[in-house]
Amino acid sequence: MKTFCGRANPTTGAMEWLEEDENYDYHQEIARSRYADMLHDKDRNVKYYQGIRAAVSRVKERGEKAIVLDIGTGTGLLSMMAASAGADFCYAVEVFKPMANAAVKIVEKNGFCGKIKVINKHSTEVTVGPDGDMQCRANILVTELFDTELIGEGALPTYEHAHKYLVQEGCEAVPHRATVYVQLVESKRMWSWNKLFPVHVEAEDGEKIIVSPSEMENCPGVPSVCDIQLNQMPSSDFTILSDVVTMFSVDFSKPVRSASTYYRAQLEPVKSGKAQIVLSWWDIDMDPSGMINCTMAPYWVKSTSAFQWRDHWMQCVYFLPNEEPVLQGEKVYLTACRDEYSLWYKLQKARGEEENKADVRVESPVCRCQAHLLWNRPRFGELNDQNRTRQYIESLMKVLKTDSVCLCISDGSLLPVLAHYLGAKQVHCFFFFFKFFKANHLEDKIKIIEARPELLTSSHLEDKKVSVLVGEPFFTTSLLPWHNLYFWYARTAVTSHLTNNVTVLPQSASLHMMIVEFQDLWRIRSPCGTCEGFDVQTMDDMIKNSLNFRESKEAEPHPLWEYPCKSLSDPQEVLTFDFRKTVPQQCLSTEGSVNLSRKGKSHGAVLWMEYHLTADISVSTGLIQISNEKGNCEWNPHCKQAVYFFSSVIESETLSDLPSAVTYAINFNTKTGEIAMDFQL
Ligand code: SAH
């Protein structure tokens, strides 16, 4: 059987449905999953084990049999902990078939067959009774169904159902309780991920300001969570406006309600400023006393938090619908609204309590301005990067003439507006949101072409030839850095519409590479072996098998500003792409070797693109600089870089001789737009 998977084609920029082996989807799921990261999360594992032991003891002390329900058992880890702690029987429920199969193997390997029954079902399908999946209701409920936002993986409806149908009244729950905390901050950096700041353009005929549509003013944006490694956000990038307050708690040992609701908290600003952002994280108490606590608090709240690195649980950034001035000491109310799966926040000045309550609407936010649909958070940040905009302005000024006919190929780009203000005679671009042009009175000035570049006709261009072709390049479908080379393919497709001496901006691009040692990111791909004394190697084998599922290993995208690393080699340019020419027929390949100039573990290679706008102006989507003699790297904060992990290094605990060089072979397949690579240490 074959299945179809959606994937953007980098040569056409379009989404295509590719026929994949039926196992493809699940191999991707396993290979890129967070199971390994969870198994490496020592703090989490230790505390679950303590909590489970305590819960089993409490039940035993009451003279009852300890019957455990473990919802979302994954590898079976928490059930094995319960069985070791003396539980009489465990029902381990797992909906994802490959994981349920793995759990069966792992449970067997660790000798718990008689104590743990793996049930491959969604918990809401599980039956109880003499002929059911479970003989009787459980009196201990163990789960780990939380994401960074706590409820995004459906923990609430799952608990609601379990309390109704699968567990006894008064059951013990591990974790016992979860609490969500918030802190109000002002942060230009984070706010720039949510609103478009005015862009100032010094044109020949005076200063022009690009503004966002007025609908953006109060737009609540999109409901998807913004989860980041907040521990990588320097304290100089935000101003704390309030103390940390508890927003709400959920007691998992009692019936849980998943229906939409809201919570409110009173805040007394510790500083005057502009309330823009709600930072949020949670903790879980594994037992009722609160003595076994696992917290996601960031470094300024709990100084030891950086010690337990994890990627499966981070922190959340919520954007208030609009910025709100607050005064030190003058109370405000923060409302958290939630539905079954997501949360959003509102801030209200302390007026009459009743008046405030009437204001609370619990519908999930919907973007009204269209900008939040067109631009995601990093893209907002990129468009608000003044330094970057200045480089594009400078290079446009170099190439534009008063008779320029300009065509822009990039998704949701400000380049057409810049080109217009900087004096191009005629500007065309592909698809854009009309409201934006309207807000800037450009609807008659910039022509939107409602066709793909491949289908461009001369009538779209009013029978003119393009003398300046521009792109950032940026495309929303790009996953890996080189997927933005779609610009090159589009440029090739529109060749017949270009003048003979057309200027292409950027004139070229280059692929760069550097060997790095990660502080923590390597963990997500490293095998676990044993976890709290349980043999989970089956899981390691499964991940390895899935990673090798495709013939050649693939690089994966990661926003490296969130994942510190140090460079072990100099950055190296490995391939160049000349946009002044069309895409060649034959593949572009290169081979070579990089010397390792610094001591460390070569966890992998990082690859990124640099765009050469003109001969002397370039922008990097990867390395910005190596900040110190230790080799710490500063990365472009708006882009994801490609990471190719060297499994041989990650898998060996003790590397006796560190390699002194890494050889590579990199091949850009011009037919598919993909890059294949191979490294030898
Ligand atoms: N308990 C394991 C794995 C946690 S990951 C550990 O702590 O290491 C969560 C797992 O729960 C995933 O494998 C997911 O497929 C599964 N899951 C989530 N909701 C579920 C539900 N309602 N019923 C069954 N499985 C569920």
Image (cartoon, rainbow, N blue to C red):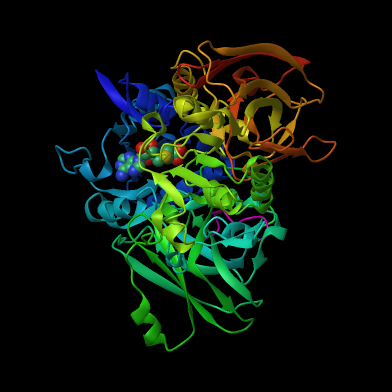
The answer to whether any part of residue 289 appears in the image is: no
Screen quadrant of the N terminus: top left
Q: Is residue 436 above or below residue 358?
A: above
- In the figure, 242 relative to 374: above or below? below
- Given the current orientation, which residue lies at the most extreme bottom position? 352
Residue 623 seen in the current view? yes
Magenta span: predominant SS is loop
Q: Residue at x 46, y 16 (%)?
A: 671
Q: Identify which residue, 168 or 303, lies in the foreground.
A: 303
Where residue 592 appears, x then y in whole percent? 70, 12
Front-lying residue, 65 or 293: 293
Quadrant hosting ligand 1: top left
Query: In the image, is residue 532 above or below residue 146?
Result: above
Asked where in the image residue 7 lies, by quadrant, the reply is top left
Foreground residue, 270 or 464? 464
Q: Residue furthest right?
A: 629
- Please report the residue visible at 59 percent of the width from the left and 62 percent of the height from the top: 209
In the image, is residue 174 part of the stretch drawn in magenta?
no
At which x and y percent is residue 223? 40, 56
Residue 32, compared with residue 658, is above or below; it is: below
The quadrant of the picture occupied by the C terminus is: top right
Question: Which residue is nearer to you in this view: 110 or 324?
Answer: 324
Rendered residue at 31%/64% (across/down): 260
Q: Is residue 497 left or right of residue 566?
A: left
The span shown in magenta is 288-300
State the image coordinates of residue 257 (x, y, percent, origin top left).
30, 62
